[in-house]
Each structure stands twice: as C-alpha cells, then as structure tokens.
C-alpha cells in the first residue's frame, strides 16, 4: 500500500518509516513537489490533523495521512496543546518552546502532562481518525539529546528517563505516535488493505 505523509518534517518522516516498516510505501510532500506550508489554524489537535490530510488529498487525490501532536500540561490548563509547535513563536523553535514550558512551570508542583497524537487517514476519500496518548510528567530540566520537540523534558509514566534519553526503538514502542499509528495499521489489516 502507498501513502503520503502530509508533512515536511523529516524527523516525523523517519519516525513514521520506522514505525510502519515495510508494510507501507511512504511518500513525503517533496516526492509530489508540494513545497507550500500546510496551514495549522484549527483550534484542536484533531481538527488540525483532519485539515492537513484533506489539504493534501485535495491536491493529489492520493491516499494520505496527517498527524497533529500536542503536549498538554495539566497545571498550564492544557497548554501548549494545539499550539505546541509554535508555543514560543512562529519560528517553531524546540529549544525556546522547552524553555518557555520550564519557565511557566517554575512555581508549580503539578508537572503532570500527556502527549496526544491524532492521525487522520484519508483512504479512497473516507476520513478516519486514530488517537494515541501517553501520560507522564515534565522534568525540572532538559535531559537527553535524542528525539525532537519536547522529548528532552517529557518523562513517560513508569520510566526514569525522558524521551530525549531513550533510543528511537524504545521510544517507538511506547510513544503517542506509535499508539496512533498502530491503531491505523490494525484498521488497515482488519479491512484487508494491508
């Protein structure tokens, strides 16, 4: 099966290719010369994922999936949430985003957080959504250089290390993205599409 991932993010492409293995031939937007930035102006993670998938499907007519992910922190009323990539500004700077989160949590004891991913799949014109959530907490400082985004400050429940300290294979076994992508793969298998 062939799918387009509606993203320019090379880190996401690498992560999804590892998660999908050889079950699906994955193309990115560059393979279709789609170089424009996909707008992310919706007010929820789910709506953003759906919008991105439809945006690419409308331009290609090909089966596509898009994901949107947010870090939701309880004591910050769910922030950064849908604004995770641009939390500190339009430039999508992960280091500044992490610094802002750590600064906003300075005087807070409750550091509970969750990563939420929604994957929207458009297959033969039908849109389906798959959710993955992993609970954890925000650490007091950055730990580890692996991963991307907020990985160096997110420690999943049951682990003594951040995503940033984990090897990619270990993170892929438990991450919000892997939970959502495995739900998508199970759907495709159950419907004899893989």
Image (tube, helix red, strand yellow):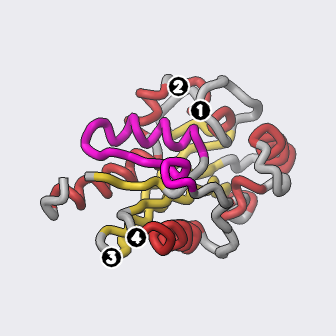
Q: Is residue 11 magenta?
A: yes
User: Can you identify the residue that label 3 sits on?
Assistant: 126
Residue at image position (82%, 50%) is 91
Compared across the picture, whether 165 is left or right of 26 comes to: right
As helix, strand or loop, the secondary structure at mark 2 comes to: loop
Dot 4 crowding, Cα within 10 Å, few <14, some 14–19, many 20+: few
Task: Mark 3: give few (<14), some (14-19) or many (20+) Cα within 10 Å.
Answer: few
As measured in the structure, the alpha-carbon distance from the residue carrying label 1 to the one carrying label 3 is: 32 Å
As drawn, 6 above or below 123: above
Give the mark toward the camera: 1 or 4: 4
On residue 61, the disc is 4
The answer to whether residue 82 is seen in the rendering is yes
Looking at the image, residue 192 sits to the left or right of residue 40; the answer is left
Name which residue lies at 31% across and 56% down. Answer: 183
Distance in Å between CA atoms under marks 2 and 1: 8 Å
Cα separation, mark 2 vs mark 4, equals 37 Å
- Marks 4 and 3: which is nearer the front? 4
> Looking at the image, which is closer to me, 123 or 90?
123
Which of the two discs, 2 and 1, sits closer to the camera?
1
CA–CA distance between discs 3 and 2?
A: 36 Å
Is disc 2 surrounded by few (<14), some (14 to 19) or many (20+) residues within 10 Å?
some
Side of 194 relative to 26 (left or right): left
> Dot 4: what SS?
loop
The quarter holding residue 19 reads: top left
Q: Residue at x 66, y 75 (%)?
A: 43
Q: Earlier in the sequence, mark 2 or mark 1?
A: 1
The residue indicated by pointer 1 is: 147
Disc on the earlier residue, 4 or 3: 4
Residue 166's disc is 2
Q: Which marked residue is nearer to the observer: mark 2 or mark 4? A: 4
Residue 125 percent across, percent down from the top left: 34, 76
Which residues, given as a range, are shown in magenta? 9-33
């Amino acid at each position: 099966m062939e799918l387009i991932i509606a993203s320019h993010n090379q880190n996401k492409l690498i992560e999804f290719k590892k998660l999908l293995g050889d079950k699906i031939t994955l193309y990115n937007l560059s393979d279709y010369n789609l170089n424009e930035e996909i707008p992310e102006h919706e007010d929820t993670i789910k709506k953003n994922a759906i919008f991105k998938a439809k945006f690419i499907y409308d331009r290609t007519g090909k089966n596509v999936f898009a994901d949107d992910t947010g870090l939701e922190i309880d004591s910050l009323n769910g922030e950064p949430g849908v604004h995770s990539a641009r939390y500190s500004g339009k430039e999508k700077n992960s280091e500044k985003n992490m610094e802002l989160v750590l600064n906003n949590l300075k005087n807070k004891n409750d550091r509970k957080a969750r990563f939420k991913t929604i994957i929207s799949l458009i297959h033969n014109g039908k849109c389906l959504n798959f959710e993955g959530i992993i609970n954890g907490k925000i650490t007091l400082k950055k730990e580890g250089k692996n991963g991307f985004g907020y990985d160096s400050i997110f420690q999943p429940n049951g682990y003594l290390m951040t995503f940033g300290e984990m090897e990619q294979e270990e993170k892929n076994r438990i991450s919000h993205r892997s939970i959502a992508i495995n739900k998508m793969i199970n759907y495709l298998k159950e419907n004899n599409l893989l």
